[in-house]
Amino acid sequence: MLIHTVKRGESLASIGAEYGVSPDIIGGLNGLSAMSPPAVGQGLIIRFPKRIHTVRAGDSLSSLAVIYGVTVNALFRANPWLYGSASLTVGQRLVIDYTETPPYDFLAGGYVYTFTPRRLLEQTAPFVNVLIPFTYGFRQDGSLYATDDARVLDVAKRFGTEAWMHLSTYTEGERFDTELATGLLASTGVQDLLIEAVLATMEEKGYSGLDVDFEFIGKENALPYARFLERLHGPLSERGYTLTAALAPKTSATQAGSLYEGHDYAAVGAAVDYVLLMTYEWGYTLGPPLAVSPLPSVRRVIDYALTVIPKEKIFLGISNYGYDWALPYNKEEPVAAPSLSTEAAVALALSTGAEIQYDNEWQAPFFTYEKEGVRHEVWYEDVRSINARLALIPEYGLSGALYWNLTRPNTGNLSLLAAVDRRVGES
């Protein structure tokens, strides 16, 4: 596997000729049509097929898996352009496997909105170990309000992918509610009712783990929150469920701000099976243009976390999105920058004639363009930036990666996961 940066004048055909790989395969690995021009400066993952099969009458993915000694999911991972569909066409060329052996061994998963199109869920599920539908919330009396997670759970079951329930203070009003968290953490009675409801839901829906995400809870709730997680962990563990807690991206124990002060890394880390470091949102919708997850900033969070949490308990958060900022940026009256997917960012660069640049310090792609007299600056993630962050997992000995989020299409990212992550390839 390698990553190619597109130069001016190149096409998928010329790039394919350079590496001896069909442009159809390069396009399929990166979410592009073989006839579509890549954007100048775009990062493309290149994989080298080892075995290719031309579909004959009577072939099915199941029969091919038996013939070649692989799994059906492995065929989906080798051919992301199938989008998880078992439908084949006579004459179609399928990659059975690639020459490289995935170098890393970690767990991979991510969050999905429940409105995620089924086609995208089916493309994604074979590439990850776990899907996490966003989100279950709760009321002041400890009762749950459900999310319509049936589609996500159905797809996860079909592909043998685990599903974790997500519990947060994100309310029906679409915000993280500090008052709601404070009420829960002050009452063991309400906690007991919520824990009972969570366990019943997990059993009913077939979840294998729980991910808890309480944000902006403030310093006064830091220790009560850790105690709640400890109370929650007992009954979950007894039933064989894992418990994960999301942590704000802190770089010290004394970092100021309600988002950071509410999360005591040491206490939370001791109370749960895993933590997720939410290492993203340095570049955010109301902030100035910059990378969502600058690599030096990500490293500082990991370095601090490892001083108080065992490395095997840590999942690294991976951003899978970007923002499009209008310029000039006005700190006093910021205009919200819309978020966009990797594939949408590349399409935008193509439509505006922008040349994609890459910041080697922040390890992130960006470009500028002008529309209706307004200058714009876009920062997003691609296979180069995500690869740089995934490499931190074996470097630090972390357990794996959780993406925020997998609702935004990024075929190149899935191809990258298949190329580097040995653990996902086991299913």
Image: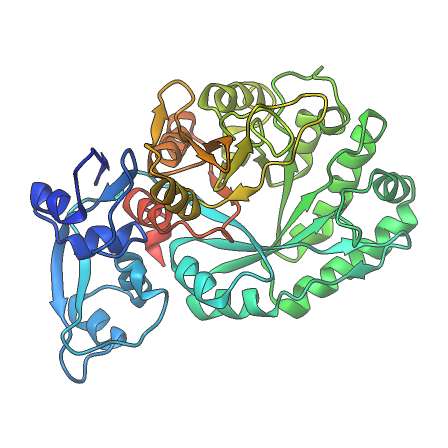
Q: Residue furthest bottom?
A: 58
Q: In this view, does 248 lie to the left or right of 53?
A: right
Q: Which residue is drawn at 20% across and 46% down?
A: 47
- Give the quarter of the image for residue 280: top right
Camera-nearest residue between 47 and 238: 47
Q: In this view, does 59 lie to the left or right of 333?
A: left
Q: How many labels does the image show?
A: 0
Which quadrant is home to the N terminus?
top left
Q: Position of residue 393 (x, y in %)?
A: 42, 32
Evaluate whether residue 315 shows in this view.
no
Which quadrant is home to the C terminus?
bottom left
Q: Residue at x 60, y 32 (%)?
A: 284
Camera-nearest residue between 231 and 353: 353
Q: Position of residue 386 (x, y in %)?
A: 39, 36
Evaluate whether residue 220 shows in this view.
yes
Q: Is residue 48 above or below residue 331?
A: below
Camera-nearest residue between 335 and 279: 335
Q: In this view, does 108 lie above or below 277?
A: below
The image's colour scheme reads: rainbow
